[in-house]
Amino acid sequence: MRTGQIALVIAGLALAAGLGASLGSGFLANPALAATPRNAPPGPIATCDQFAVLQSMLGGPAYVKSREERSAKIAAMTAGLDAEIAALREKMNTITDRNSPEAKELQAKGQQLSLQLRAKKAETDKLTEQGNLKEVEEVYRLVIDATQAVAKREGYSYVIGSRSLPATFVSQTLSGAFQEMYARPVLFSPDGIDITDLIFKELKVDRLPPPGSEPAKPEAKPSAAPTTPAAPGK
């Protein structure tokens, strides 16, 4: 194993150990809490793949359209500068002497416009991030509300959010793989306690295939039976 690979593995294990330590730090810092048994009220437990619900909602037509409209508005904020820079480049291409006063003036103007565009891009990137964050927060709240409604109706006292099993890693990095592990706190559960499908039904959302999976192939339609042409005169 190469040194770089070993470092990556150690970093990943340290990340996992740090998470475990942070989860238990409250009890370790307070011996009284650690010594006092804290029994949760008994009740049936359900599981829900809230990540699948979130991804399906965000990938639905309504939110896709919302993001496209937001992207168009944000792109319009830099359209003027983009056009100015494009026109400046075209004008520069017509000048043969790049050391002429006109060329130097255009170069200085181009640098000024590039700095303005960079600042505007930073602003639009922030707006994009804020819009996406607001969208995820809104969808997550809807998922929580639907989960609570279904759990109360079905008689569950607790619902644990956990990615479905078996685990098939989509990430191409070690840190991403660890994140996928953290998304599956439930490693085993009895059949019949997963309420993910009920959440989809509650929200009236179609389940989308998970990221990285192959798209479903369309069903083959049976070919029409050949017809025998009628004999002449009939």
Image (spheres, rainbow, N blue to C red):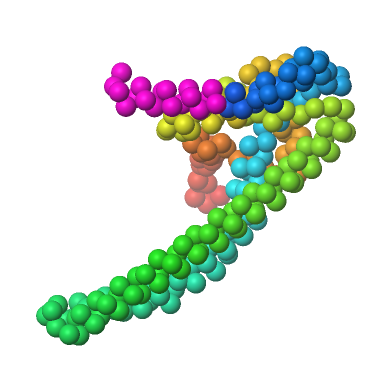
Task: Report the quarter where the N terminus lies.
Answer: top left
**What is the x, y in percent for residue 173?**
42, 32
Whether residue 190 is in magenta: the answer is: no
Q: Is residue 95 visible?
A: yes
Q: Judge from the rendering whether residue 76 lies leftward or rightward of residue 197; answer left or right.
A: left
**What is the x, y in percent for residue 218?**
53, 39
Residue 137, compared with residue 7, is above or below; it is below
- Residue at (88, 33) in percent of width and height: 153
Q: Quadrant of residue 192?
A: top right
- Residue at (86, 29) in percent of width and height: 154
**What is the x, y in percent for residue 196?**
71, 32
* In front of the other: 98 or 210: 98
- Residue at (48, 22) in percent of width and height: 13
* In front of the other: 207 or 167: 167
Whether residue 12 is in magenta: the answer is: yes
Residue 210, compared with residue 78, is above or below; it is above
* Residue found at the far bottom of this picture: 102
- Residue at (46, 68) in percent of width and height: 120
**What is the x, y in percent for residue 115?**
37, 70
Q: Quadrant of residue 92?
A: bottom left
Q: Is residue 91 visible?
A: no
What secondary structure is the stretch in magenta mostly built from?
Answer: helix
Stretch in magenta: 1-18
Residue 68, compared with residue 77, is above or below; it is above
* In front of the other: 208 or 5: 5
In the rendered picture of this protein, how many numbered marks are placed on residues? 0
